[in-house]
Image: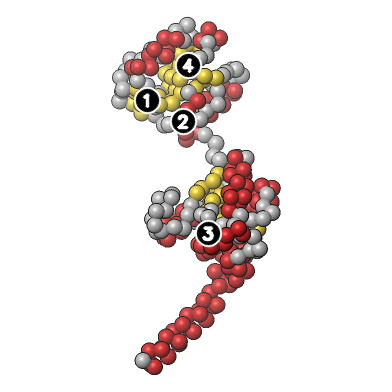
Amino acid sequence: MKVVCRWLEDTDVRYDLACHHSNGVNGVDLAGVDPGRYDIFIFVCGPWRHTNTNLLGRFHHCVKIGVNLSIEDESGQGFDLLYPRDLGGQSFPDLVLATEKDARPKVGICLVHDQAEYGERQRHHHVRGVVEALIEGGTIVPVFVDTLHADNPYGIPSASSLEAVLSGLDVLVSTRLHGMVFALKMGVPVVAIDAIAGRAKVTKQAKALGWPVVLGGDDLEVDLLADAIRTCLQKGGRERARAVGQHAAPRIRAISTRFKTDLQKILQDR
């Protein structure tokens, strides 16, 4: 649709989009539009079925053009001009290949469920509302993820699968501690949000890792969240995220050494 609209604009042709609103395209109602207002009717994309010929009948006085259609026979099914995707034994590239690439950042969204252990300190509802408002603003491409193993709501079956998804993001917005940690492990910058009033384990872990982009749930606003995302997207953001692993490695080795030493003592004393 966008490709054909661009072609029409390139040739200074005024047009209306007519659609079924259920497909998410804003335009005039296809069922209720007055065919008499138009000289050209263009049907864009999809399989063209015999049952659709009634639609062409409504626009019989128009020049009828089919674009990016899959048609099983050679008849053209009532079109005056046809630029098919598939027609009989011939196939042509789908026009999606000519659409402009979306330049918006891919931002992962990882929001923890309500946590009863924090009682009235929880700010999950407020945080979720702010994140939803950011998404509705249309400035990012949201990619929803979760760290749950059992009944993962987005069908991510394992930690390795989660890492594969995270590695393709530009930024992660996370109220989950392990969302933050896994993303930083993969070198993906994180807007960590501590959704607990007075701050809790998310803030403590970010401090332990030396990660600076941490927001509180109490005073979170859309503009503040958007600014934090921009900070993560700035040059050097991924390098700072990757540096977290380097910062953590010697401290984890120290924990490993202590663990093994203490375990050996326990075994020797038994």
Is label 2 in a helix, a strand or a loop?
helix
What amino acid type is highlighted by mark number 2?
Leu
Q: Residues within 10 Å of mark 2 (few under 14, many from 20)?
A: some
What amino acid type is highlighted by mark number 3?
Ala
**Mark nearer the N terminus (3 vs 2):** 2
Q: CA gap, disc 4 to disc 1?
A: 19 Å
Q: Which mark is residue 116?
A: 3
**Mark nearer the N terminus (2 vs 1):** 1
Q: CA gap, disc 1 to disc 3?
A: 51 Å
Q: Which mark is residue 47?
A: 1
Residue 21 in the image, given as x and y percentages of width and height = 50, 25
Q: CA gap, disc 2 to disc 4?
A: 26 Å
Q: Are marks 3 and 4 in contact (CB under 8 Å)?
A: no
Q: CA gap, disc 2 to disc 1?
A: 14 Å
Q: CA gap, disc 3 to disc 4?
A: 50 Å
What amino acid type is highlighted by mark number 4?
Ala
Is label 1 in a helix, a strand or a loop?
strand
Q: Which mark is residue 31?
A: 4
**Mark nearer the N terminus (3 vs 4):** 4
Residue 169 in the image, given as x and y percentages of width and height = 53, 52
What amino acid type is highlighted by mark number 1?
Pro
Q: Would you place residue 210 above or below residue 7 in this image?
A: below
